[in-house]
Amino acid sequence: MQKYKVFINDKWIFFGEVLKNQTTENEEYDILDGTSLLIHNFAEMVKSGTFDRNIALIFTKNVKESFEQFLGYFDVLEAAGGIVKHKNNGYLMIKRFGVWDFPKGKIEKGERIAEAALREVEEETGVQNLEIESELPTTYHMYRYAKQWIVKRTYWFLMNSDYQGKLIPQEEEDILKAVWVDQDKLSTYLKGTYGNLIDLVRQAGI
């Protein structure tokens, strides 16, 4: 089943055939039958900074085509990253701009997605001996840069590592901390983080 969810600050637009399993508890949202006009209108609302609600656009067909129409209104940046688990130390997290996050970064020209994910995790944290276990859902979030709204499409992988060395946060990328987080403390670290990451962890079943 085709489905896409784009986060704009703490709100989102969902594109899909049904809404099942795409919301979190206590969220309020409007459900609308998807049309090209609505896609255009919501894109314009994002650009003007007036998008202020959760919207589920439901399509009977051509979900991917409709989503690509929405992306066509913006520049799209391709990135890749990983949720890394350690058999002894839990999950790998970084702190960037005062917010806990998972390591990720821009895919370089000609680079394969999985290779980019492994490279970015190692560069941002110093963790080695990384292996990809499985592919995770792709996330989409939007941010404003140089007076333009950008869609960041991030391809995620579940990884594992037996690395025992020191974690080295990549300070030139504004990463001030890199830590292993026990699974029972993961929810605490995720409080106040980005909505797309909370959604990712929930979908991944972590």
Image: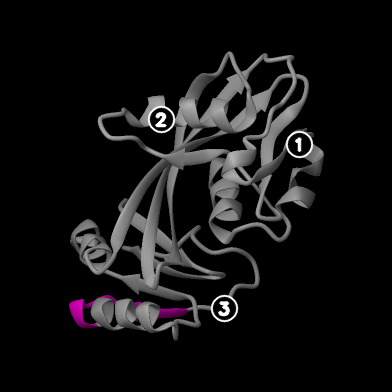
Q: Is residue 24 above or below residue 180?
A: below
The answer to whether residue 38 is left or right of residue 103 is: left
Mark 1 is surrounded, within 10 Å at the Cα level, by few (under 14), some (14 to 19) or many (20 or more) other residues, namely: few
* Relative image position of residue 199 (x, y in whole percent): 56, 54
Magenta highlight range: 30-37
Give the colouring mode of the picture. one colour
Please check the rendered image and state whether residue 193 is part of the magenta-colored stretch, yes or no: no
- Looking at the image, is mark 3 or mark 2 earlier in the sequence? 3
- Check disc 1 and give the amino acid type: Gln
What's the residue at 73%, 57% (across, down)? 191
Please check the rendered image and state whether residue 36 is part of the magenta-colored stretch, yes or no: yes
- Check disc 2 and give the amino acid type: Ala
Check disc 3 and report its element: helix, strand or loop.
Answer: loop
| Circle nearer the viewer, 1 or 2 | 2
Check disc 2 and report its element: helix, strand or loop.
Answer: helix
* Relative image position of residue 104 (x, y in whole percent): 51, 40
Instruction: Report the disc number at residue 183.
Output: 1
| Residue 44, image quadrant | bottom left
Instruction: Report the disc number at residue 28.
Output: 3
* Relative image position of residue 168 (x, y in whole percent): 69, 28
Q: Is residue 65 above or below residue 109?
A: below
What's the residue at 30%, 53% (across, down)? 2
190 and 117: which is toward the camera: 117
176 and 107: which is toward the camera: 176
Check disc 1 and report its element: helix, strand or loop.
Answer: helix
Instruction: Report the disc number at residue 66.
Output: none
